[in-house]
Image: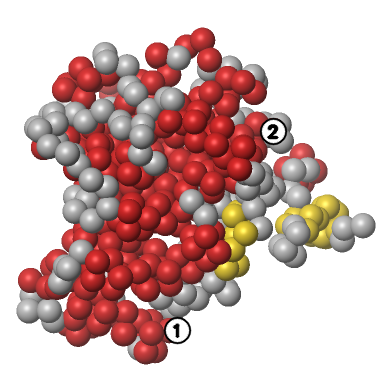
């Protein structure tokens, strides 16, 4: 039997039920609080508020642990594929061979976009940010599949998930082609998921494109690392919009917009911009470390620290080992890597960083790897969205399966009290 929590407000004491997760996480169920006492909890940023009970992703921030459905991220990224992880997150278990083959076939059969959508790409200015195009086109997809948008119909949901997983790389690659003024490359369904994307991104109609299996593999691993991260900003947006029973395409579009922000998915872009600033200033890392520690300075080190992780981000640990391998494979000597290494050295050995748990996070190295793969800086967040898509879908499905009510947070009003209206001539 669960413990109960006692809360005393003035001369009134109430008992609240508690809940304990499979890994020992404890929560107090606050549902009767307002009705019983007239009080609500005020928790800006929801840093101490659990919005859901979930069986998808487990994070232990103090010990640097990340698991999808119980599987350690380190094992998945070394031994699995992105599509296997998609299936795991969305369906709850790793697929067997026949399940995987069927799943892969379903996605492969939905990679094409409706030809009319080309006109939407062309309506954007060439310098439009790819995330704006991605959010718009994903939402627009719902207009082409209006007969299969019922969120309560499992067959409709399954079809929509396959379509999203199949078409998001096509939209992403075509948004890049639009920015370059290059002809769109249709998906080559003889290739695997990441190989197909690479060809659409970097191939030309005038010549053969050969996918490098090592590059395809590292991209696959990057997508796995991004696949889910519990109740983050974009996952919460996905659940919140989904709680209104909006269709899956609209919910993903909302999640894309949430991810776009520089404090969420856009952080890896800002890491590269920061490293570039330091490199252009004679690689003076010490100067910028001092600025980061100066409370009067506006400079902020990007790619360090995490809301959840209070030790080394396990995703960053893997990417740290991958950087040299990727750069060696591509015969690339990126000067920003040296800047990044020196910043990391400060983070691991400087008491200022240690006392504040400011370790490198996943954004710190993912941008360097994407840059080495010739993926433009403004496409970094799009890559993040491609990876995060199965996690968003899993969160959406779980929210519906558990029958959560429409999201509707309370507030503490701090505005003007009631006052009479004054006509414009008397103001």
Residue 125 at x, y percent in the picture: 12, 29
Horizontal placement of 17 versus 312: left or right? right
Residue 300 at x, y percent in the picture: 27, 69
Which residue is nearer to you in this view: 241 or 97? 97
Residue 226 at x, y percent in the picture: 44, 53
For the question of whether residue 252 can be seen, the reply is no
Image height of 107 relative to 17, above or below: above
Image height of 215 relative to 163, above or below: below
For the question of whether residue 424 can be seen, the reply is yes
Which residue is nearer to you in this view: 67 or 63? 67
Residue 205: quarter of image: top left
- At 37% from the left edge and 89% from the top edge, which residue is drawn? 349
Residue 424 at x, y percent in the picture: 27, 21
Marker disc for residue 355: 1
Name the image quarter holding the N terminus.
bottom right
Q: Secondary structure at mark 2?
A: helix
**Marks 2 and 1, the one that precedes in the sequence:** 1
Closer to us: mark 2 or mark 1?
A: 2
Name the image quarter holding the C terminus.
top left
Task: Work out which residue is located at the far top of the displayed protein and give it.
Answer: 147
Mark 2 highlights which residue? 401
Gap between marks 2 and 1 measured at Cα: 42 Å
């Amino acid at each position: 039997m669960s413990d109960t929590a006692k809360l005393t407000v003035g001369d009134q004491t109430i008992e609240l039920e508690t809940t304990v997760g499979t890994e020992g996480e404890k929560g107090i169920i606050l549902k009767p609080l307002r009705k019983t006492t007239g009080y609500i909890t005020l928790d800006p940023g929801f840093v101490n508020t659990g919005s859901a009970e979930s069986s998808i992703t487990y994070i232990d921030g103090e010990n640097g642990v990340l698991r999808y459905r119980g599987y350690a991220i380190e094992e998945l990224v070394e031994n699995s594929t992105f599509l296997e992880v998609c299936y795991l997150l969305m369906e709850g278990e790793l697929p067997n061979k026949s399940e995987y083959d069927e799943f892969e076939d379903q996605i492969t059969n939905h990679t094409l976009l409706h030809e009319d959508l080309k006109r939407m790409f062309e309506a954007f200015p060439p310098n439009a940010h790819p995330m704006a195009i991605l959010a718009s086109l994903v939402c627009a997809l719902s207009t082409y599949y209006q007969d299969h948008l019922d969120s309560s119909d499992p067959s409709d949901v399954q079809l929509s998930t396959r379509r999203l997983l199949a078409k998001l790389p096509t939209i992403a690659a075509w948004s890049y082609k639009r920015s370059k003024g290059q002809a769109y490359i249709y998906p080559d369904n003889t290739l695997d998921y990441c190989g197909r994307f690479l060809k659409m991104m970097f191939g030309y109609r005038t010549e053969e494109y050969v996918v490098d299996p090592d590059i395809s593999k590292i991209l696959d691993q990057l997508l796995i690392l991004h696949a889910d991260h519990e109740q983050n900003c974009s996952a919460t947006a996905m659940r919140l919009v989904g709680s209104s029973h909006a269709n899956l395409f609209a919910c993903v579009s909302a999640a894309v917009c949430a991810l776009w922000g520089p404090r969420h998915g856009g952080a890896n872009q800002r890491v590269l911009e920061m490293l570039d600033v330091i490199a252009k200033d004679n690689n003076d890392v010490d100067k910028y470390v001092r600025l980061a520690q100066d409370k009067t300075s506006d400079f902020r080190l990007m790619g360090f620290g995490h809301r959840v992780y209070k030790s080394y981000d396990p995703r960053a640990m893997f990417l740290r080992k991958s950087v040299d391998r990727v750069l060696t494979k591509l015969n690339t000597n990126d000067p920003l890597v040296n800047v990044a290494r020196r910043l990391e050295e400060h983070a691991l050995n400087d008491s200022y960083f240690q006392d504040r748990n400011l370790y490198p996070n996943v954004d710190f190295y993912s941008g360097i790897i994407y840059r080495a793969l010739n993926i433009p800086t403004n496409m970094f967040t799009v890559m993040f969205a491609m990876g995060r898509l199965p996690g968003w879908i899993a969160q959406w499905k779980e929210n519906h399966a558990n029958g959560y009510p429409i999201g509707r947070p309370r507030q503490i009003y701090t505005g003007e009290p009631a006052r009479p209206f004054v006509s414009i001539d008397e103001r």
